[in-house]
Image: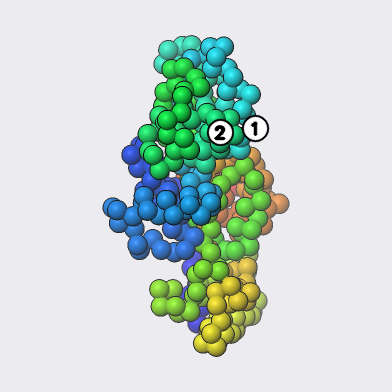
């Protein structure tokens, strides 16, 4: 019998620069369901292996916010907005009541701006050699400083949220269409659900748009159990993960890590909390919106009012 679970979502917090590597490892191990291997010593080798393989999408889940004086020399950064994952703006700093240049981006973007424009200031300031492109590089800008990680006192452009959701495969297929967000997804290729670590069973999400105990629900459940039986049979025949995953239905449970700034989150909610969105997508997104509103009420009050309070 398949295991049936409900969709859930939670926020993964990153509160300090010292936690950057452990945060990345926590997000990255979701892909392979190897969270049980995490210790105090595993983050650096895990990330080092990812960087050597060239799969840098995992490091996109950690964002750092910088500021620098609004000078002619520093304004050159405004010509570098084409680096994906970098956000650059001139904003009033309420602490000093002066305009400053605010730069933020994920760790992959900070490595990309070093590769593309030879700007190494941001990686140097972070101070972790693991991420350096050129360790002995000369600074490109003046008086750059780190403000914070993930959240800041600046606009929604420079505030980021990372979430962990348990949803069905169909839901994450819709959600991952949002190109300005970053994703790490449980791999149905490398996760062989016939193994003991997965309980030798398939886990599926309880469908929110099929009435429980109805004839249609019973038919859905019968189909899920048939798929599981075939999956396990093919595994016994020597089937590998990349063969077995060809059987998996849209209902299969998947862990999804998703990161973006609040500007993009608001755009996503405007589409995916709307009644036109698929019910399973809307369910996950409204759970996220409720948590975001508790964390950032000023940024999400209007959408909370529209999609949750008034419905």
Q: Position of residue 278 (x, y in %)?
A: 67, 57
The answer to whether residue 93 shows anywhere in this view is no
Q: Position of residue 153 (x, y in %)?
A: 45, 25
In the image, is residue 72 above or below residue 286? Answer: above
Residue 303 quadrant: top right
| Badge number at residue 113 | 2
Kindly identify the residue that appears in the image at 38 percent across and 61 percent down: 35
Q: Horizontal placement of 59 versus 41: left or right?
A: right
Point out the residue furthest to the right here.
276
Nearest to the observer: residue 70 or residue 110: 110
Q: Position of residue 42 (x, y in %)?
A: 33, 55
Kindly identify the residue that appears in the image at 55 percent across and 69 percent down: 189
**Which mark is first along the chain, 2 or 1?**
1
Q: Position of residue 118 (x, y in %)?
A: 54, 30
Residue 228 quadrant: bottom right
Query: In the structure shown, which secondary structural element does the residue marked by tag 2 occupy?
Result: helix
In the image, is residue 97 above or below residue 131? Answer: above
Q: Are marks 1 and 2 in contact (CB under 8 Å)?
A: no
Nearest to the observer: residue 82 or residue 294: 82
Kindly identify the residue that appears in the image at 62 percent across and 52 percent down: 176
Per the image, the residue denoted by label 1 is 82
Q: Residues within 10 Å of mark 2 (few under 14, many from 20)?
A: many
Kindly identify the residue that appears in the image at 59 percent across and 19 percent down: 76
In the image, is residue 134 above or below residue 9? Answer: above
In the image, is residue 238 above or below residue 106? Answer: below
Q: Horizontal placement of 147 versus 308: left or right?
A: left
Q: Residues within 10 Å of mark 1 (few under 14, many from 20)?
A: few
């Amino acid at each position: 019998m398949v295991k049936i679970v409900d969709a859930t979502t939670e926020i993964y917090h990153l509160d300090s620069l010292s936690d950057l590597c452990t945060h990345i490892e926590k997000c990255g191990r979701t892909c392979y369901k190897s969270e049980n291997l995490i210790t105090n010593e595993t983050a650096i080798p895990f990330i080092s292996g990812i960087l050597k393989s060239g799969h840098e999408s995992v490091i996109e889940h950690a964002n750092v916010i910088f500021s620098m004086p609004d000078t002619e020399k520093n304004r050159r950064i405004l010509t570098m907005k084409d680096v994906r994952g970098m956000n650059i703006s001139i904003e009033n700093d309420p602490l000093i009541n002066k305009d400053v240049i605010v730069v933020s981006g994920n760790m992959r973007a900070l490595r990309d701006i070093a590769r593309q424009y030879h700007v190494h200031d941001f990686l140097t300031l972070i101070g972790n050699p693991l991420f350096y492109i050129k360790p002995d590089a000369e600074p490109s800008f003046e008086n750059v400083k780190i403000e914070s990680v993930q959240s800041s006192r600046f606009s929604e452009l420079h505030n980021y949220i990372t979430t962990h959701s348990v949803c069905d495969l169909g839901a994450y297929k819709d959600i991952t269409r949002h190109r300005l967000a970053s994703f790490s997804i449980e791999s149905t290729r490398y996760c062989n659900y016939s193994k003991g670590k997965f309980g030798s069973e398939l886990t599926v999400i309880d469908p929110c748009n099929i009435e429980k105990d109805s004839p249609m629900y019973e038919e859905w459940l019968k189909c899920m159990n048939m798929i599981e039986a075939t999956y396990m049979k093919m595994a016994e025949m020597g089937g590998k993960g990349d063969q077995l995953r060809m059987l998996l239905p849209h209902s299969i449970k998947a862990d999804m890590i998703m990161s973006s700034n609040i500007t993009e989150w608001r755009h996503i909610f405007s589409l995916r909390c709307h009644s036109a969105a698929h019910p399973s997508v809307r369910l996950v997104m409204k759970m996220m919106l409720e948590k975001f509103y508790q964390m950032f009420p000023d940024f999400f009050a209007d959408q909370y009012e529209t999609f949750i309070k008034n419905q």
